[in-house]
Every structure is written in C-alpha cells, then in structure tokens.
Image: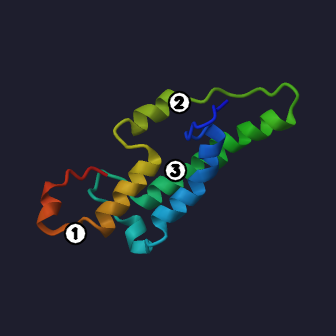
Amino acid sequence: MREKGDDRLDGLDLLEQIPAILRGLTRELNREDAVWKPAPDRVSVGEVLAHLSHSDSHRYRPRVDRFLNQELPELEPDDAQMYLDLYRDDLGHIRQIAELVRARKHWQQAGPLGREYDLKP
C-alpha cells in the first residue's frame, strides 16, 4: 500500500501504463525503423515487441486465466532462469526500445557528439 505523497507506481499501475509508454516510444517509427538492428547480433524494436507479445499471450495470459477460472489451478513452473540467461545482456524492455529508437532516429543527427555517446541498444 502506498503512503500519501509516494509517487511510485505499484506493479499494477505500472503494467497499466506500459502500452501508452510503448506507443509513445514507437509512434514515429516506420517499418524500416522497426526492423533496423544496431548490429547483426542485436535485436530490433520489432523483435522486442514480438517477444513481449509472445510472452504475454503464450506464457502469462494462460496462467492468469487458469488462476481466475479454476478453484485450485495447477500452474506449471515458469522457467524464469532460462529467460534471464537468454536476455542477460539486454536492457529492460522499455529501456531497450527507448535506446533503439534513440539510436535509429536521433544518434545520426548528433554529429560529432554522437562519437562520444556510448550507444549500446
């Protein structure tokens, strides 16, 4: 429970804001921007969004549905460690998308200052 004056979002408030945050970050991207990768071994904005969509529809949504619709739901273990190992070197998803958008849309216009920016989307 938040105390008066505490501006931090609790988990559900934060989840509710994520679609608007992602729309704001990606509203100026075209298809070419969405599939662009800063390097061959990195991911694109489109791939991050596909990962989020897949995780939601194939891993989390079925678990929530079972929890809400069954008296004693049996929930299979979620192999969080596997996903941590897969994405250990990636940023948090929102920050990752923000860095990719910045790299694609704004870094080139930074001119000589761009060389000083440590870009790692």
Q: Residues within 10 Å of mark 1 (few under 14, many from 20)?
A: few
Labelled pair 2, 3 in contact (Cβ < 8 Å): no
Q: Going 46% across and 47% down the picture, which residue do you hit? A: 93
Q: Quadrant of residue 14?
A: top right
Q: Where is mark 2, residue-wise? A: 80
Amino acid, disc 1 = Gln
The tag earlier along the polypeptide, 1 or 3, is 3
- Toward which corner of the image does residue 67 lie, by quadrant? top right
Q: CA distance from mark 1 to mark 3?
A: 27 Å
Q: In the drawing, does residue 50 fall left or right of residue 104?
A: right
For label 2, the crowd category at 10 Å Cα-Cα, with few meaning under 14, some 14 to 19 and many 20 or more, is: few
Image coordinates of residue 106 in percent, x first then y, are 29, 67
Q: Residue at x 49, y 70 (%)?
A: 27
Number of disc labels: 3
- Which residue type carries mark 3? His
Q: Residue at x 26, y 56 (%)?
A: 39
- Position of residue 120 relative to residue 101, above or below, is above
**Residue 4 in view, yes or no:** yes
2 to the left or right of 52: right
Q: Which residue is mark 3?
A: 51
- Residue 63 image point, x, y percent: 72, 37
Identify the image's colour scheme: rainbow, by chain, secondary structure or one colour: rainbow
Instruction: Report, in whole angstroms, how far the alpha carbon at label 2 lies from the one at label 3.
Output: 14 Å
Circle on res. 17: none
Q: Earlier in the sequence, mark 1 or mark 2?
A: 2
Label 1, on which residue? 108
